[in-house]
Image (cartoon, rainbow, N blue to C red):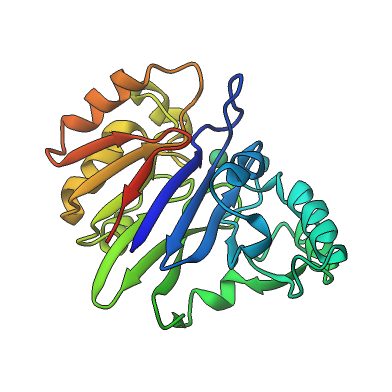
Amino acid sequence: MVELTVLGSFGPYAPANGACSGYLLEIDGFTIMLDCGHGAFSKLQKYTDYTKLGLLVITHLHPDHYSDIYCLRQALKYAMREGKRTEPLYVYLPEGPSNLVEEIEQWTDVFTVINLQEAWQAENDFNLFKLSFFPVKHSISTYGVKLSVGEKTLLVYTADTGWDNKLVEECKEAEYILAECSLKEFELAERGENHLSAGQAGVLAHSCGAKNLILTHFFPAYQQAQLQRQAEVAFDGKIYLAATGKKYLLG
Ligand SMILES: [Zn+2]
């Protein structure tokens, strides 16, 4: 069983009681956290025992995707002191900004850092599943994430990205696409280098032959129902709006 639970779906800040980017993947009992933005670690504790976390993947080092790593570090330190965990957590990180990477790499008591720049060239085969990573277009080094089981691509997470035709290839025939939709269409001219609109997320899902599209990374002030309608223009598959606690059975 492969299940996705949304921990947080906002960026670049969260509204009251909300959380920024964070997703929990459970694959036959093995747990992976994708991104760890503001509030995501707090929400994680509602759905799983963090001391048993198998992997953490940080797509990029913007606060709405990684800032709760500081809290996770403290919690893991405590768990190790109490004997609730013995091994450091594997953390996939992009190669920069170097000051942030170096800071996190120092915490060897709780984290073992794996460089995404190296991982994206490699087969990350965990027997039960395979993870792959691909660079996307953003203002700092950022990677999308693909989860496959057998020959099936169950999930592609775009992270934060501007439109890039390569995305269509990476998302090809995915069961689910978890796509950011930070921008309204009118913002694309100015900020489209770094983020997608909901309309573009719909075009992506349609072009790659995905079955399901989960919209995420919502700017808190925007109407989500309106974003969904924009995505529906191009995509006639199932469209969901990510929200804390929502679960999706991927396979
Ligand atoms: Zn973001």
Q: Residue 64's x, y, as percent? A: 62, 39
Q: Nearer the viewer, residue 186 or 215?
A: 215
Image coordinates for residue 137, horizontal then vertical, percent: 47, 52
Relative vertical location of residue 151 with respect to residue 192 in this rendering, above or below: below
The residue lying at 79 percent from left, 60 percent from top is 79
Residue 94 visible (yes or no): no
Percent across and percent down for residue 42 are 66, 40
Residue 107 visible in this rendered orientation of the protein: yes
When the figure is inspected, residue 226 is found, relative to residue 110, above or below; the finding is above
Residue located 77% across and 59% down the image: 76
Write the residue at 16% across / 30% down: 233
In this image, 67 relative to 231: left or right? Answer: right
Q: Position of residue 26 (x, y in %)?
A: 45, 60
Quadrant including the N terminus: bottom left
Q: Quadrant of the C terminus?
A: bottom left
* Tally of numbered tags: 0
Quarter holding ligand 1: top right
**Quadrant in which residue 86 is drawn:** bottom right
Q: Nearer the viewer, residue 212 or 87?
A: 87
Among all residues in the image, which is located at the extreme left? 236
Looking at the image, residue 227 sits to the left or right of residue 220; the answer is: left
**Does 38 appear above or below 18?**
below
Instruction: Please state if 6 lies on the left or on the right of 110 as rendered.
Output: left
Front one among 136 and 58: 58
